[in-house]
Image: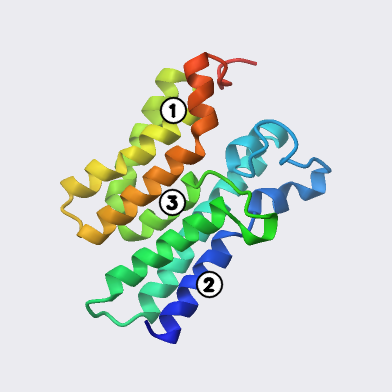
Amino acid sequence: MTPMALFLIVASYLVGAIPFGLLLSRSSGIDIRAQGSKNIGATNVARLLGKKLGLLTLLADIGKGFTPLFVAGRLLPADGQQGTLLALCGAATVIGHMFPLYLGFRGGKGVATGLGVFLYLAPKAVLGCLLVFAAAVGLSGYVSVGSLLGALAVLPGLWFLQESAWKLALAAAVVVLIWLKHHQNISRLLQGTEKSWRKK
């Protein structure tokens, strides 16, 4: 592995680890890590501080998934190793969001950041994921259900589009991490205690 490739992987992690939800909510005086779901992602920010800050957090988290891949795709040589290195950068970005160095490795659930990664790698597959997300949230009323099913939908989407094996491998790893990070949501869904957008 070249020094440039190693630098891009480490930089991807550090960018992914930037807690935009926490930074954007700081001026409100509310610590989003101590209220609501205690998550630094867009859903908790929107619930606690309104849709505007929630949307800004969402866009920032998508951006930090997209940007490292965009940069790496232009700096890495287009050879047989590029795909593997892009996969490592993508994984590092999502892991950075989930386990950020800046917050004692306690971060978010990776959905928006993973969306940003695949928005660069396979935008057509992402469109399918967004449709599944919207349908799942609309029918169930739970963002967590939409996140889980929307993330899972990337796998058949990539397969249908006949994308590279390394993209499928990266997607499988990211989906497993996202589902593991949602273990509390899954538990609450099974118990019937998960918060719904339909309930005030």
Q: Which of the 4 quarters of the picture holds residue 116?
A: bottom left
Q: Position of residue 147 (x, y in %)?
A: 44, 35
User: Can you say which quadrant of the picture contains the C terminus?
Assistant: top right
Q: Earlier in the sequence, mark 3 or mark 2?
A: 2
Q: Is residue 145 above or below residue 62?
A: above
Image position of 159 (left or right of 60) = left
Residue at image mark 1: 145
Q: Residue at point 35% right, 71% down?
A: 85
Q: Residue at point 27% right, 44% down?
A: 155
Extreme residue toward the right, this view? 29
Q: Secondary structure at mark 3?
A: helix
Q: Residues within 10 Å of mark 3 (few under 14, many from 20)?
A: many
Extreme residue toward the bottom, this view? 3
Q: Position of residue 141 (x, y in %)?
A: 48, 20
Image position of 36 (left or right of 145) = right
The Cα–Cα distance between marks 1 and 3, rounded to whole angstroms, is: 16 Å
Q: Earlier in the sequence, mark 1 or mark 3?
A: 3
Q: Amino acid at mark 1?
A: Val
Residue at image mark 3: 114
Residue at image mark 2: 11
Q: Secondary structure at mark 2?
A: helix
